[in-house]
Image: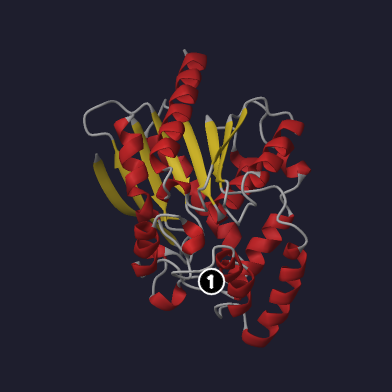
Amino acid sequence: MKSIELQLPVTRNQVAFTRGWTPEERPVIGAVQIVHGMAEHGGRYAHVARALTAAGFAVYVQDLPGHGRTARARDELGQFPEGAGWRLALQSVRCLQRELGDWHPDVPLFLYGHSMGSFLLQDYLGRHAHDLAGAVISASTADVGPTRALGLMILKLESLRVGLDEPSAIADLLTFRSYNRRFKPNRTPFDWLSTDAAEVDRYVADPHCGFRCSTGLWIELLDAIGRLDDRRAARVPDKLPLLLTAGEDDPVCAGAKGPRLLAQRYRDAGLRDVTVRTYAGARHELLNDHCREQALRDLVDWLAQRATQAAQREA
């Protein structure tokens, strides 16, 4: 596959570091835009790109605000621009989607969102889904439970004491550390990500992964999740195909329960093509777990089928 790297302008003062991969010797049948999760970066999806480009898809992923090489310095990792990070993240996704329409005209476009990226994607689909041929929502849910409102209140209080840019020890305790306790005895602080020890070790060793995110980022995330309700789902075009995936031991979305709840929300909103696929024994990062080969095959098959359907509709 061929690869590119570029700085995508988002606003006058903000750019998003973007990676792209395209098939080497075959025509592009579709373009997939990946929206990554919290405390990671787009470079971790190169193996996903290899599988997708082999099937004829172009793949692009940008480092979100405060992540990867979009962060201008080490101390910016985990920070959103004060009070505007979620909006900037949505805007950066939109900017790349528009570019893909120019770079790959006349092929279907798909969005894939994982974890925090899945919540960004849910929000985005209620705004800009009309040009898409489908979307994949990974490790997500329709209901994060009553702890969201409580956590939001606690974090707002914390921000009064430490400010919005300080890494949040409280959020780390309530989320990542809490997730990890379910898999005691723990070998690392990130056992909850995958059953594959080598993949967990790669994450731990990556300087652009595993950092604590700021109080401000957590506040914006929890606030945005609270707006993802039935009315937001009803804005999504009913013809949009959706694939919802999760590991059945994923603590973030309560295993299979989260995607099933979310699928029902979209079905109740009128969407006609909603598929749920869950994987036994897998944790938070399906595509880095023991089931990765099956999960990648399922992803490629689903995308290829919807790309063919989109091409037939345009014919």
Q: Position of residue 159 (x, y in %)?
A: 66, 80
Which residue occupies the extreme front position in the image? 185
Q: Residue visible at 47% across and 33% down?
A: 109
Disc 1 marks which residue?
213
Q: Residue visible at 52% across and 47% down?
A: 281
Which quadrant of the figure has residue 198? bottom left
Is residue 83 left or right of 60 when viewed as pictured?
right
Q: Position of residue 11 (x, y in %)?
A: 48, 59
In the displayed structure, 191 sits above or below 45; it is below
In the displayed structure, 170 sits above or below 175; it is below
Which quadrant of the figure has residue 144? bottom right
| Label 1: which secondary element | loop
| Residue 5 in view | yes
Q: Residue visible at 33% across and 37% down?
A: 51
Q: Position of residue 126 (x, y in %)?
A: 66, 42
Q: Residues within 10 Å of mark 1 (few under 14, many from 20)?
A: many
Q: Position of residue 303 (x, y in %)?
A: 46, 29
Q: Residue visible at 42% across and 42% down?
A: 99
Q: Nearer the viewer, residue 150 or 307?
A: 150
Which residue occupies the extreme left position in the image? 25
In the displayed structure, 263 sits above or below 272; it is below
Is residue 196 left or right of 145 when viewed as pictured?
left
Q: Nearer the viewer, residue 122 or 202?
A: 202
Q: Amino acid at mark 1?
A: Cys
| Residue 132 in view | no
